Image: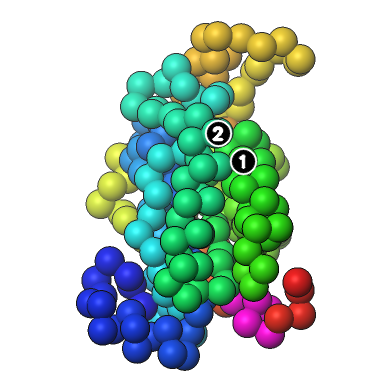
Amino acid sequence: MILEEMTMPQVEAGLQTCKTVYIPFGSLEEHGSHLPLSTDTLQAYEVGKRAAERIPLFVAPPVPYGSCRSTNRHPGTISISTSTLRALLKDLVRSFYRQGFRQVIALTGHAGGAHRMALQDAGEELLEELSELRMAVVTEYELAKEQGRGLVETPGDAHAGEIETSRIMHSHPHLVQGTASEEYPDFPVGILVRDKRKYWPGGVWGDPSKATVAKGALLEQLVVDRVVELVRLLDEGRYV
């Protein structure tokens, strides 16, 4: 059930049998010279739509902005603060809860550390606030990395590399602009720097040349499988 395409009566009817909503979080962030700025958003939203084809699930419109620190000097990256992100998730979940939703999966396609922690903190606070809420906060990248172990050839692949390039080649091939060179950031250990692009010029963390459409399809399916499992676990109420 894709919420943005539904009518009021359809939502009302759907809530009679399903009280779980999937909220995809993404970013507007550089992904090398070959992938679109919306890569994180596209991946997170696509997974939700595929999961909703298999089980009853409301899929909310994606949140297309995130907190991006290591890429904030790269052209095209538009970042929001962690406090804004935290407040946004809390406001969305409160509103869904008032509408009758009781299970929430917040899946983020953007895997930045501060971004992930902001969503997790907000989720923990919501659990204390809303007595009937069951919630999962997960990262798309971590699910793809864990479930795709053995499929991904690049050690440490993380951003605009083998995994993400494969995913977009599969789901949105018209948005892929060739490929990019293998690259890894070289930030000084423990030292905070303003011009992060100086230490990560191409914005790639991994090897895009190892990406294939077939890998993208398999990786997407693995993440969808995991989301379907999460929905079922929340519905069962074993974790409170």
Residue 87 vertical placement versus 13 (above, below) = above
Q: For residue 118, which numbered disc appears in the image?
A: 1
**SS for callout 2:** helix
Identify residue type, mark 2: Thr
| Image quarter of residue 239 | bottom right
- Residue occupying the point 44% across, 29% down: 79
Q: CA distance from mark 1 to mark 2?
A: 6 Å
Label 1: state its secondary structure.
helix
Report whether 237 appears left or right of 23.
right
Residue found at x 25% / y 77%: 8
Q: Is residue 111 left or right of residue 211?
A: right
Crowd band around label 1 with a 10 angstrom C-alpha radius: few (<14), some (14–19), many (20+): some
* Residue 31 appears in the rendering: no
Q: Is residue 14 above or below residue 99?
A: below
Q: Residue at x 55, y 67 (%)?
A: 104
Q: Quadrant of the C terminus?
A: bottom right
Magenta segment main secondary structure: helix
Report the front residue among 126 and 190: 126
Q: Percent x, y for residue 52?
A: 43, 78
Q: Which callout, 1 or 2, points at the residue further toward the start of the chain?
A: 2
Quarter of the image for the N terminus: give it: bottom left
Is 232 part of what is drawn in magenta?
yes
Above or below, 198 relative to 155: above
**Mark 2 neighbour class, 10 Å CA radius: few under 14, some 14 to 19, many 20 or more:** some
Q: Is residue 15 left or right of residue 121?
A: left
Image location of residue 13, percent across then percent down: 34, 88
Most foreground residue, 90 or 197? 90
Q: Amino acid at mark 1?
A: Ala
| Residue 230, position as x, y percentages in the image | 64, 73
The residue segment tinted magenta is 229-236
Q: Which residue is mark 2?
A: 82
